[in-house]
Structure formats: C-alpha cells, structure tokens
Amino acid sequence: SGYAQSNMATQGDSFPVLRQVVLDATDARGLAEFYRELLGYVYRAGDEPPPAGEPDTKAGEWLVIHHSSGSPRIAFEQVAALAKATWPEGEIPQQLHLDLVVPNLQDLEIHHRRAIALGARVLEDRTADEEEPLWVYADPAGHPFCIFVPVG
C-alpha cells in the first residue's frame, strides 16, 4: 500500500541506487565494444582492451562501460553459453531490453545505420508509427534493444 511504502521510506536513510545493468555474453569484450561504439561510452579504468598481441584477461570476467560523466553504466559478464532470445516469436522471451532514445527522425535514421554497421540485427521496424517511431534490434549476443523517438 502507499502508506506502507511511505512509512518504510521514513524508517531508512535512503533507497538502493541502480548502479548498472549487467548483460551476459559469450564474448564479453565484443559486446562491450558494440555498446561502447553505439553509445559513445568509455571503459571503466582498467577494463580497456589490452595492447595488440597481449591476452585479454579482463574479458574473461567482467567489463564495465559508462557515459563520460560516470553514469549510466553497463556491465558485461562472460558466460560459457547463452540461449539467445527468440522474441517476438518462439520459446525464449526477451527477458530484458534496453530502451535508447534519440531526439528526432533524422537521428533515428543515423543511429539505425550505425547500429546495423556495428552488428545489430533488425527484429522489428516500427518507423512508420507516427506516435513513437522505433527500431527493435538484437545486439550481437542476441539481447533485444530499441532505438526510438519518445512521445512528448
């Protein structure tokens, strides 16, 4: 109830803060690079790719990228296997997806081309929707994400 929620809030000093979204990947470095280039993010200090010819030990564990301001953050965890979402049809739902917004249709087209060039796969084209034009994609690991022009 609303009372219970407000009462709980007054008993504690603060609420938990969302630190980051974590995506599993069979190629953590590859997926981190995809989103780093798509979003213009930077690596957390120490998570950058190693010099050419050196082993990428960090990619076998956990990588973090973030906006240049430090937030928001996306982390990538290396896993041995990952069942790709089959959304919008099939047995495996999307489970989680990222919503990315752009200010206008011109930017939507620019970022659509960038997403495809970086390895995204189109799942749905709703750019003809006058109220909320959007593209739905799968990233290289199969995680769905959207790029759209928000309403209002």
Image (cartoon, rainbow, N blue to C red):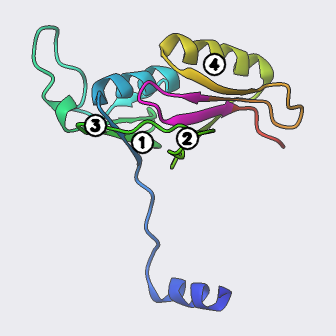
Residue drawn 56% across the image and 14% down it: 116
Measure the alpha-carbon separation of dots 4 and 3. 29 Å
At label 1, which amino acid type do we have? Arg
Measure the alpha-carbon separation of dots 1 and 3. 23 Å
Which mark is first along the chain, 3 or 1?
1
Q: Which residues are magenta?
A: 137-147
From the image, state whether disc 1 or disc 4 is nearer to you. Answer: 4
Q: Quadrant of the C terminus?
A: top right
Residue drawn 64% across the image and 91% down it: 3
Residue 30, position in %: x, y?
A: 33, 22
Q: Quadrant of the N terminus?
A: bottom right
State left or right for residue 76 relative to residue 139: left
Which mark is first along the chain, 3 or 2?
3
Label at residue 81: 3
Which element is circle 4 on?
helix
Which mark is first along the chain, 2 or 1?
1
Q: Is residue 140 above or below residue 90?
A: above
From the image, state whether disc 2 or disc 3 is nearer to you. Answer: 3
Q: Are marks 2 and 3 in contact (CB under 8 Å)?
A: no
Residue 150, position in %: x, y?
A: 76, 38
Q: Which residue is mark 1?
A: 73
Q: Which residue is mark 2?
A: 98
Measure the alpha-carbon separation of dots 2 and 4. 15 Å
Label at residue 111: 4
